[in-house]
Amino acid sequence: MFGLDHAIAGLSGGGALLVVLGVALLLGLRHASDPDHLAAVTTLANGEGAGGRPASRLGLAWGLGHARSLFAFGLASVFWRAYPPGAVQQGTECVIGLVIAALAVWLFLRWRAGALANGAARRRSGRTAYSIGLVHRASGSARIGILLLAAIPQRGVALAGLTIFAFGALSL
């Protein structure tokens, strides 16, 4: 297609790393804006009081948990080309859906009780947010990014891309 394939292939003298890192960053940013992530973090951060500091801490804790599990899952794919069976992937998606639904019910009940309106919201811990981030693991668009990275023959380049993919969105 307009010589683009040849241009990309010609970058194998070291420019491929830059291409991989750039694509990994874009995929990571795309993954960070998935609706399930926005729902989880918004629900966690809602009612955290004035200012953005407590909500930012919870978002960061969630992101660190998610990035850690995404990185660990990606390592197996990059180094050993190991992928979970379809049943495990579907089970993971189901668990994530249940966690998001539980967070939504929890937020709704707090709202009904008036805890959000009168500032009596119970503070959530970073540990809770981190744990919810761990559960999110590699769902949705993350699998696509990991599969692309696992297809890279140079494991060092793939590992650098995985690092940017998993942790890159936290730098925002």
Image: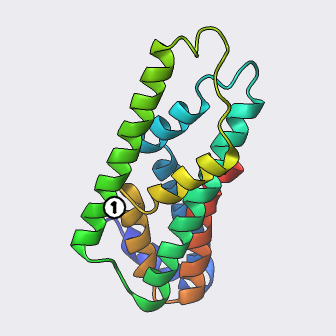
For the point 65% across and 27% down, which residue is it?
122
Which residue is nearer to you in this view: 142 or 98? 98
Nearest to the observer: residue 50 or residue 108: 108
* Front-most of residues 5 and 101: 101
Mark 1 = which residue?
92
Q: Tell me which residue sits at (54%, 11%) in the image.
A: 114
Q: Is residue 34 above or below residue 72?
A: above
Residue at x 68% of width, y 42% of height: 125
Residue 35 is situated, as x and y percent measured from the top left of the image, at 40, 39
Q: The residue tagged with tag 1: helix, strand or loop?
A: helix
Pick the quarter of the image with the C terminus: top right
Amino acid type, label 1: Thr
Residue 39 place in picture, x, y as percent: 45, 36
Q: Residue at x 47, y 44 (%)?
A: 37
Instruction: Please name whichever residue, 63 or 134, is drawn nearer the observer in this view of the structure.
Output: 134
Left or right, 169 with reference to 104 = right
Q: Evaluate whether residue 19 shows in this view.
A: no
Instruction: Give the image location of residue 91, x and y in percent.
Output: 28, 62
Quadrant of the image for the N terminus?
bottom left
